[in-house]
Every structure is written in structure tokens, then in C-alpha cells.
Amino acid sequence: MLHIQSKLPGVNTTIFSVMSKLAAEHDAINLSQGFPDYACDPKLTELVNKAMKDGFNQYAPMPGSTFLKETIAEKVEKLYNIKYDPENEITVTAGGTQAIFTALAAIIHAGDEVIIFEPAYDSYAPTIKLLGGLVKTYELAPPNYAIDWDMVKKLFTVKTRMIILNTPQNPTGSILSSDDMKSLIKLISGTDIIILSDEVYEHLIYDGQKHQSVMCYPELRQRSFIVASFGKLLHATGWKLGYCLAPEDLTKEFRKVHQFNVFSVNSPMQQAIAEYIKEPKNYIEIGSFFQQKRDYFRNLLAESRFKLLPCNGSYFQCASYSNISDEKDTDFSIRLIKEFGVATIPVSAFYQKATDHKIIRFCFAKENDTLALAAGKLKNV
Ligand code: PMP
Ligand code: GLN
């Protein structure tokens, strides 16, 4: 027998694969893994076809197509009034996940500490560990998952190298406020701490609230990697394309890793996406589109025994089932699939210690008919 010394002992297949597989096996409605069940805009697929026919079939430039980087810079400037230089500050990646991995790999040395807020997207902690870093966790509490910045300060040591932010947040749907940003600025001033700001849900923010990007705060911008995903923006999670914004010195380090991690990413899609997002009307309504879905789903579930948590952003709705059952959330989610035909994600999967607050996550990036069908089943629980 070959002896393999695992670099990630204790890490299993990600919850998203596990739940989507179970959903398929039991023919359940899949509200677990975060992806739309409807088609993306046919204009977009036509643009990909056109790009392929036009010959965009060889390697794109290592940091991304110039056209796409310039279009991203225009979009960012239009939205936030901040200029990122396409040549030196924008890198096109194979989705948000690769950008997160690459930013961490570029910065984290063995023994460095990274602060994360849990529940957290499940790639952060394993990636930090893989790189020899130490995860310092701050567990947020339902229902609001607010950050007490004095508690964050207590996690600081001389080895604190990075803080990972995620707003709007997966899985909780919470968002950071400008007060959060001001507290963070105070906390890190005079340190060399770097910020990795996962903003893949930047457009999915509701009730007239404003997305607080770290780029809007100069003290944060100059030390931040910002991660974005076209999967969310274009309703095309399977395309696995995104980008990373960072000042030149950070981008330089990022690209040193990126060039040996993927070198460059899918060329025809970069061309198509650039043409598509040149027109802001192709994405500017996405917030109200998902707000309608959130409201539709919440109204349907109001008649169930689930207690809905606030949802200020993202396409996830969390709900407590504590007045339905005291089962572990993993057991409850599996029973929901098998007995009621609806797949969800147990929120304990987003905590390294599997902290169980009896909360599950629904993805509402689905056709209204799908949501209605699922809610009909959930009302029987
Ligand atoms: N960050 C968060 C918070 C996410 O939910 C996801 C998954 N959608 C990603 C990053 C990764 O995005 P991508 O699918 O583009 O890799
Ligand atoms: N971000 C998505 C979610 O939270 C899924 C990502 C994945 O499957 N890796 O459901």
C-alpha cells in the first residue's frame, strides 16, 4: 500500500458536491449548491460562439484579455468611481475560487495567521492550511452575524498576515456596513495586514442598501485583493471566470503565482464577456431581479414552520428549524432530501468546528416555479 501523507487530513468532499449528488440521487429539488436553474442570456452564448468562430481559440494573455480587463476597469469605475489600471491591477481568473487560492498562495508563508469569519465559504480554511498558514476563526452568531471589531482585535498577533472579508456573505446573506469598514481601518492602521475581500455577490444587495467595497476606502484599497466572479454576474456559474483587483505591488505577487497556477483562462469566453458587459444594461438589474426572488421565496416560506433569518444580500436564504426538530443540521438536511424532496445546505458545513445552530441554507437563484414547488414541500415539514 502506498503511504500518502495527506496535506489536508480531515477534509472531505465539499458539501456542495455532496448535497447536489444526494439531490440528484433522490430526485429532490436542489436548493443546496448555489447556481441558477434557468438559462443565461442567449445573447451571451451567441457571443461565445461568435468569439470561437472569430478565432479566439488560443491562449489569452497571461493576466487576461486586454479587452476584458479594460471593460472590467470601465465597469468598476462606473459603479464605484475608482480607477484600476487594466495593465497592472486587474487579473482575469478561473472564477472566484482560483482568485482566492492564488491571492492566499501569493502572500501566506508557513506559520502566518489568517483571520476568517465563520460561517465562511468553504474554500478559505483548507486553502490557508494547505499553504502552511494558521486559521484564526471568529465565529459569528445568528441571527445577524454581526462583527464585534474589539473581538477581532483580540485575534491579532505578530503573525497576523491577512483578514478575509466576504460581503455580501455566503451563507448568511449578511452585509458589512460603512461603520464596519471604519472599524476595520482603525484596527489595521499601522500594521502590514493584507485584506482579501471576497465580493463575488457585490450586485446582490437588497432594499436599497449600498455595497461596501473595500476599494471605496483608500486605507483598505491599498492593501486589498478584491475577488469577483462572472458566474454570479452572468447567471453562468459553470463558466468559472472571475477576476482579482489589487494595487500594482500586490498584483505583481498575485501574477507570479497565477502564471504557474493556470497561466491564463478561457479565451473565447473572455472575449464574449467583455462584449456583453460593455453594456451595463446587461447586468445592472441583477440586484432587483434577485430581490424579487428573495421576496417571493420568503413570502412562500412565511406559511411554513421555518424561521427565516434576515437576508440583506447574496442569493442565499438561511432558516432556523429549531422549533421543528433538534436533529443535527446535517441529519436534518439529509432527511429533508429523502422525506420531503428538497435539498439544502446545513450551515454547520461552513464552520471548521461544525458549529450547529440548527440552521439550513436555501439558494433562491431558481425559477419561481421551482421555488413554489419547493416551498409547497417545505410547508409539510
Ligand atoms: N466566494 C464565495 C463567497 C462564493 O459563494 C463562491 C461560490 N460561488 C466563490 C467565492 C467562488 O466563485 P466561483 O464560482 O467564481 O469560483
Ligand atoms: N458558491 C456556491 C455555494 O455556496 C457553490 C460553489 C461550489 O460549488 N464550489 O453554494
Image (cartoon, helix red, strand yellow):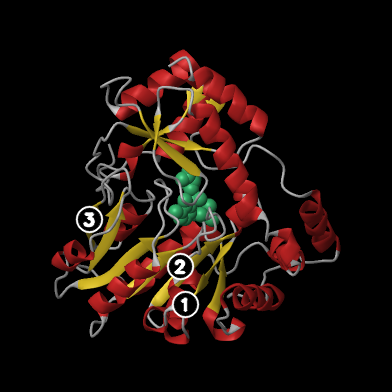
The response on whether ligand 1 sits within 8 Å of label 1 is no
In the picture, the disc for residue 52 is none
Give the x, y percent position of residue 335: 39, 18
Secondary element under disc 2, as helix, strand or loop, is loop
> What amino acid is found at the position of numbered circle 3 in the picture?
Thr
Q: Earlier in the sequence, mark 3 or mark 1?
A: 3
**Label 3: how many Cα within 10 Å (few below 14, some 14–19, many 20+):** many
What's the CA distance linking mark 2 and mark 1? 7 Å
Residue 179 in the image: above or below residue 16: below
Q: Nearer the viewer, mark 3 or mark 1?
A: 1
In the picture, the disc for residue 212 is 2
* Viewer-side residue, 199 vs 241: 199
The residue that mark 1 highlights is 216
Residue 274 visible in the picture:
yes
The response on whether ligand 1 sits within 8 Å of label 3 is no
Residue 64 in the image: above or below residue 352: below
Give the x, y percent position of residue 154: 14, 65
